[in-house]
Image (tube, helix red, strand yellow):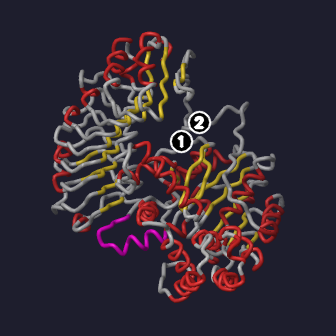
Amino acid sequence: MRSKSIIQLTAEVDQLLKTSSIFSNGLVISDEGFPEKPQLLAAPPLIGNSYQSILDEIWKNLISPMVGIISIHGTAGVGKTTTMMHINNRLATTEIFDKIIWVTLSKNFSLKKVQDDIAMQLKLYLPTYEEEKSRAARLVESLKKVEKFLIILDDMWEPISLQNVGIPLHRNHKGSKIVVTTRFWNVSRRMETDKYIIIHGLSENEAWNLFVSKAGDRVLSPDIEFIGRKMVQECDNLPILIISLGHAMRDEVNIEVWYKAFEEIIFSVASIQGLEEINVRILGFSFSRLKNYKVRDCFLYCGFFPEDYLFQPEELIRYWMAEDFISEDGDMFIQIEKGAEILTELKNRNMLEMFTKRGDGWLKMHDLFRELAIDIVRKEPEFLIKAGQGLKEAPYFWEWDNLKNISLMRNQIDILEDLEFYCPNISTLLLQDNPLSYVSPSFFTSLPGIQFLDMSYSGIEELPSSLSTLVNLRVLFLQNCNSLEKIPSVENLKKLQVLNLRGTSIKDLPKGMEELVNLRSLDLSETTKLENIQEGVISSLSRLEELQMQRCHLCTISLSTAANCLKEIRCLKNLAILTLSAVGFEDHLDTIMYLQEQNLKRYSINMYGSTKDFI
């Protein structure tokens, strides 16, 4: 038996705790006997004494009874968010506040979105159909039950009425505080701030030392140090620019390359609304120094997502794979490893930042780099990015003409009507995280060129019949469409390589699955209603490299269904990734051992003694 123990044998019973409480106002609060600890955030280190003095000043005002609203002001990239992350982590070790709520505002934020973010952290249900005023009243009542709270409103672009949101004012809730971070002075002024704190950035010596730590000791050579210091001066003491520039020039020994880089930064023409021109030049230079077009494409793709979107690392890699940015020879596991290498490079350049959410590690693109990515992409006429803009309807049909990639994710679109134009060039359509309830039956007939379609996290119950006409479709993401029960035949989708049905409510696989001769990845995890897979379907997917069936209902119905499923999985000679939950460990031991000895590179097999154990 191999040493890399792979099989997780579970004899414990999974208990479903079905408790329900009825509250007239929809409030659900965690048990008071188990207070929720403030969450530690993955904060990048702060460099130098400049930021320590800022931390001390913020702390002093947080504990002052005379201060209710604090405004942290500074230019984009100076470290406002990072500073507050350190404050959050320091507060997490104290009992100064009973509740810390962090809300990240975006350029196109909505009042309802702010209310939802606060409510989620209070475990408060706010009906979406209610008016903002009623929702605000619920929030006020909930926050009044918290003796001392801190609300951090990060990256505010426009002033917002605390009363309209539902945040009790300081004079009515002593001991509680509100901190606003913003790059705009007029926002600080109009928020009725009690204390203004300005972050100026690093000192000259701190900036240089940071640059050396990222660029490497070779920059200390006399010839290079002279031009290196000139370049650092252009960074305006902003850590994000210094780190990015340092990594871009790391271990470069050719003096001509240094001078050429300096000229490129100084003389290039670039502008993005709301950013200093020199900042845009440095960001653009750092982008140009990414090692190849694949890495650059992966960076730009992050701009397709809404501002402050949190990525799970492998989620982002799989999007890159869906767009064929990572097309190295080898199986999907190798491609995921290649994607991880690209992630590391983007993190080193400060283009992606680590973030913590519910204890897990996530990635986020800094606002400055997202604005750069969008600015670059928008110069290409075939791209349309309207992610997270609160759209209630899809763009008019004439906006789709001649497009190639469309991102409409995380809006409020609930209906997709027929397009009046034929749009053969569209290859990517990102519709995830919309409350879609209806798609016209012939909607997809106007989009024959689609290769990547994402409708995840939508409210759709039935996909239109025209989906069957997408003969060029390679990737279909439908994960966590919890209401989805019906999918039309996939018989004609012979180019399909990735099909993600995780968390859907399907009872049967779509018809024609056995025709998917190029399918490489199938995810059926969390399909808690899946009762039937026609015999021979799984074994017919000869090119399958990944099969996810964690908590798939089919393999937990009975020993015989689990046995049939495992028998067919044995036929998949190219399988590299497998997750599986099934009943009847002893009955399937031979198959389990056989799978263990195959080419599997990542696998998690949870076996239960009986269906009762699973339930």
- Residue 365: image location, x then y, percent: 53, 61
Provide the secondary structure element on which disc 2 rests.
Answer: loop
> Disc 2 designates what residue?
28
Q: CA distance from mark 2 to mark 1?
A: 7 Å
Labels 2 & 1 near each other (Cβ < 8 A): yes
Q: Compared with residue 195, is residue 519 higher up or lower down, i.e. above or below?
A: above
Q: Earlier in the sequence, mark 2 or mark 1?
A: 2
Residue 374 belongs to the span the image colors magenta: yes
Q: Horizontal and vertical percent for residue 301?
A: 42, 61
For mark 1, give the secondary structure.
loop
| Kind of residue sitting beneath label 2 | Val
Q: Which residues are magenta?
A: 371-385
Percent from the top left, x then y, of residue 32? 71, 33
Q: Quadrant of residue 22?
A: top right
Image location of residue 542, percent across then percent down: 27, 33
**Residue 110 lies in magenta, yes or no?**
no
Q: Which mark is residue 125?
A: 1
187 or 552: nearer the eye? 552
Q: Residue at x 52, y 45 (%)?
A: 126
